Amino acid sequence: MPDLLNTRPRRLLSVAFPFLLLGLQPASCGGQEPDSTTEPKVAQAPAPTPGKRPEVPQGYFLFPIKPGQQNFLAASMGELRPNHFHGGLDIKTDGRVDLPVYAAADGYISRMKQSSFGYGNVLYITHPNGLTTVYGHLNHFRGPVAEEMRRQQYEKKTYELELFFKPDQFPVKRGEVVALSGNTGGSAGPHLHWEVRTAEGGQLNPLQWGGFQEIQDHVAPSLQAFAVEALDINARVQGRFGKAVFVPKAPALPNGGGYVWADTIAANGTVGLLVQGFDRFDQAWNKNGFQKVEVLVNGQPHYAHVIDDIPFPEGSRQVNQHMDYEWRATQGRQLEKLFVDDGNELSIYKTGPSKGKLRVEPGQLYSVEIRMSDSYGNMTPLRFVLRGTEPAYRKTRSAAVKTQNLRYDISRNLLVATAADPDTASVGGNLTLYRGNRRLTLKPSYTEQSQNVYLYDLRAGRPDSLQFGSVTKRFDRQALVPSGREFGFSTANLNLGFNTKTLFDTLYVQTSYKQGLWTVQQLRTPLYSTLALTLKPETPVADQRRSAIYSITPKGGRAYVGGKWQGNTITAPIKTFGQFRILTDTIPPSARLISKGPGGVVFKIGDDLSGIASYQLEVNGQFRLLRFEHKNATLFSERDDKLGPALRGPATLRLTDQAGNEKVIHVTL
């Protein structure tokens, strides 16, 4: 294939973009909760062999909610969540808060945190074998450690606080009540989020050591859909390039025999398999994830993954490469890839050199069995047959196509162009790619319903434009950005700074600017780590101190990103592509007292744009601790607070938003 473009990508040389504090932002249950970057880590109890996961005998861990009684899970380990694997178990708490939370094993409290977001109030217990159990979304801590947290909150005059402890400070025994369950942080309802972590931070599946008698599971997983995807320029599925999705109506075989797709599926070249489904526990309707998926081809092991150990926090975001991120964003269907895609660094897979990709040869039959299992050993199989079929040009027509049209997209490194072709000739017309004074003519790979499909490998060079008949389209991908490298991209309106971990795979970058709205790529492309986004407004921003970058949702919502100004440009790290504006927030937060009395005080607060950054209450000139609940936008005192001044007399509440606007209200309690 001729080289249409012989230029080298420009590298970003020794540019450091500051990581900016984004402020208080909500996170879903199981979101990242990495170690603090401001508090020193303390030594943990050593594992028997550093770097090796310790053996955990069945029964070592006590179930932390209602031990010995039947219980239920709202979520299992490893479920596919937006931008992360769910890192543990979500244990139901009867739809209420303040159930006793028990230490799962002997150890010591090594870390605790109070926060309005993420895991909310969370406790960490490190055990003699080097593992740590994590207890999230708590309502209250219990014991001496709770008193220490409250003391330091008053000393530092903040509710949001993270503490680390030495092994001899707060020892606990198996079965000791260490907290009360709650609904704090990013929790969508009362429950306990419970994890087991390694000394290196990896998240382990607590059910992998034999499960718990409190949780019963005799229900095999259910299949919703499976897919076969063409992975290279010569590959086809059912005669087409792309992904073919198959939706079985119901299990075909009785007594747990599983699903069978009766028709053979024509394929050629290198293809990948994908699957969508869910699991359930006994007497529960929550849809949970698969724990294990295996693929056998002609009776031989071909691929397997087990989600029992996820490196944290780096590995959790790899969920965006484990599943088909683009398909979920565009089609709403969450498919797990049953092959290891480029950029996926997880170690949960067992494959041969093909990494789970299947080479289908013409004239051959491939009997495929996909086994979907849960942590309790319940398994559901899916069986189908791939038939190797030599691809050949074919054409079907549609009388509805009356005029020429042209569109294109990118799949991996391939340009996929589709031209509406009303011509009645037996073969569709050619497509021409232009680069400067050079051109390349492509024949259609196939024509369906008068739509010609053309494939071109962009690694041979990016075209300037595409032409079909009288229709010409500009190729709007502005640069090839390689993964695993520092790289800088600039236009008159923005700069993008990629680090070595920003991308999972090669990116063909696409940006635009119109009337104060910057568009950076499309939401269907994931980022692994942060991308440094620098915006260059057309006219100087008058009030830079109160102006920041905001992401704009498809429905017009606005979310504060932040940013640091340098001259007339502003830079902030982003973790998702999308649309952005520079907005100025000049309106201070709002606050009103909604109740006061012997039981405490409650304020309703809010902010119209950038969001609350800090809050502080003084009663008779003395600091009084308040707790923030973002789900109902309230600040309130806690009944068990004995350190603060009495809630009587003149009081001042001071609120500051992310833009620095301040609101002060004076009340009498």
Image (spheres, rainbow, N blue to C red):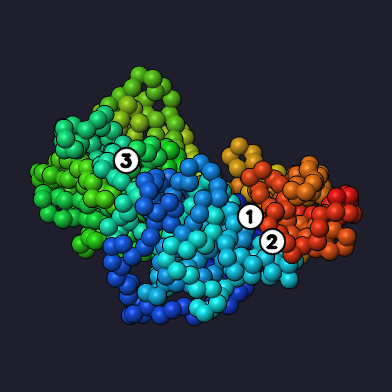
Q: Secondary structure at mark 1?
A: loop
Element class at badge 2: loop
Residue 439 picture location, percent across and down: 40, 49
x, y percent for residue 311: 40, 65
Callouts 1 and 2 close, C-beta under 8 Å: yes
Q: Are marks 3 and 2 in contact (CB under 8 Å)?
A: no
Sooner in the amino-acid sequence: mark 1 or mark 2: 1
Foreground: 542 or 458?
542
Indicate the amino acid at tag 2.
Tyr
Q: CA distance from mark 3 to mark 2?
A: 40 Å
Residue that appears at 72% across and 50% down: 636
Residue 126 vertical position relative to residue 510 in the rendered view, above or below: below
Rendered image quadrant of residue 330: top left
Residue at which label 1 appears: 116
Q: Amino acid at mark 1?
A: Ser
Q: Residue at x 30, y 59 (%)?
A: 208
| Residue at x-position 51% and y-position 50% | 99
Q: Residue at x 42, y 70 (%)?
A: 106
Residue bearing the label numbered 3: 282
Relative side of 311 to 578, left or right:
left
**Mark with earlier residue (1, 3):** 1
How packed is label 1: few (under 14 Cα within 10 Å), some, or many (20 or more)? many
- Mark 3 surroundings: few (<14), some (14-19) or many (≥20) residues within 10 A: some
